Image: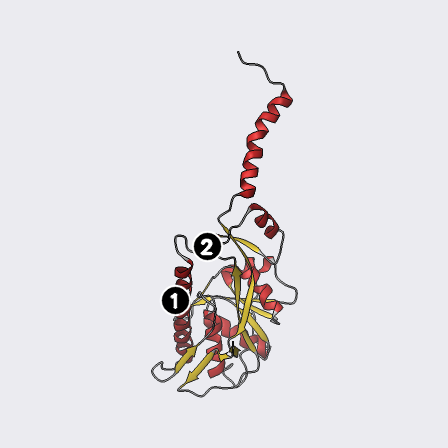
Amino acid sequence: MLSRLTRPQAVAVCALPVVALLATAAFAPLPFSLTQPGMTADVLGKNQGAQVITITGAPTRPTTGQLRMTTIEATNPDTRVFLGDVIDAWFDTDRAVMPKDSVYPSGQSTKEIEQHNTEQMKESQDAATEAALNYLDLSPSKVKVSLKLSDVGGPSAGLLFTLGIIDKLNGDGVGGDLTGGRVIAGTGTIDADGAVGAVGGVSLKTQAAKRDGATVFLVPEDECGDAQAELPKGLRLIPVTTLKGAVDSLVALESGKGTVPSC
């Protein structure tokens, strides 16, 4: 024989599974990584005591501005992230929650991930060198470029490496700095043909850029919306899709002539 439950009793009984589910979620690790603004480095200068860009086989020019590549920092792949961590980060503009698989390829050990990021950085540096020499119509058999940046992996510094090489070799093409003496930061992949690609994490990278003195930020055009979401006051966004577009924008910004695109 079944007894009839009153409405309060029925609600209480129905609530039990929900409470149990929430309690489980609160204490179960979730497949996320917590990220925050990382270090930046001026590719025209030194990093950890070593020159980032070294060029032989062609005359180089002194530079006065800065081109700062930007990074984000993520929790270690073995770090357990819980619901409380996610909720805290959701309301913190200095942190973001990202699917762990988007930061660390699943099924790989920490050592494998580090090796993968190192390989991506090397490929990015090779593409940056090729793109810059192609842009300047210089032969790679005569001009040699060495790029060195410690403790950074991945392909997202490609655009800034390329601009740094161009600035050291040719500047704005008429004897001035490509930067116009400014602190310019940015992010974006590059291929040998000069196409700029999206990278992710731009809302955190803009914060790192502003923290380290940048007033201008070069962002892949497809990521304008993400960059604007938490844009620090006083930081100007310039969207780019190609190396030529990035150079033209910086020259226009320096000279005050021509149009500088905006998001």
Number of marks present in the image shown: 2
Given the current orientation, which residue lies at the most extreme top position?
1
Residue 58: x and y, percent? 42, 87
Q: Earlier in the sequence, mark 2 or mark 1?
A: 2
Q: In the rendering, at what x and y percent does residue 16 appear?
A: 57, 30
| Quarter of the picture holding the C terminus | bottom right
Q: Looking at the picture, how far across and down is residue 89, in whole percent?
A: 59, 52
* Amino acid bearing label 2: Ser
159 over 200 or under it: above or below: below
Residue in view at x 55 percent, y 31 percent: 17
* 171 over 194 or under it: above or below: below
Identify the residue at horizontal 39%, vertical 63% (top origin).
116
Q: Is disc 2 placed on a helix, strand or loop?
A: helix
Q: Residue 88 has which mark? A: none
Q: Is residue 36 visible?
A: yes
Front residue (pair 41, 151): 151
The correct choice, above or below, for 129 with respect to 19 in the image is below
Label 2 crowd bin: few (<14), some (14–19), many (20+), radius 10 Å: few
Mark 2–mark 1 Cα distance, whole angstroms, equals: 17 Å
Residue in view at x 41 percent, y 76 percent: 129
Q: Which residue is mark 1?
A: 119
When the figure is inspected, residue 60 is found, relative to residue 90, above or below; the finding is: below
Q: Residue furthest left?
A: 141
Tell me the tag on residue 102.
2
Residue 65: x and y in percent read: 57, 79
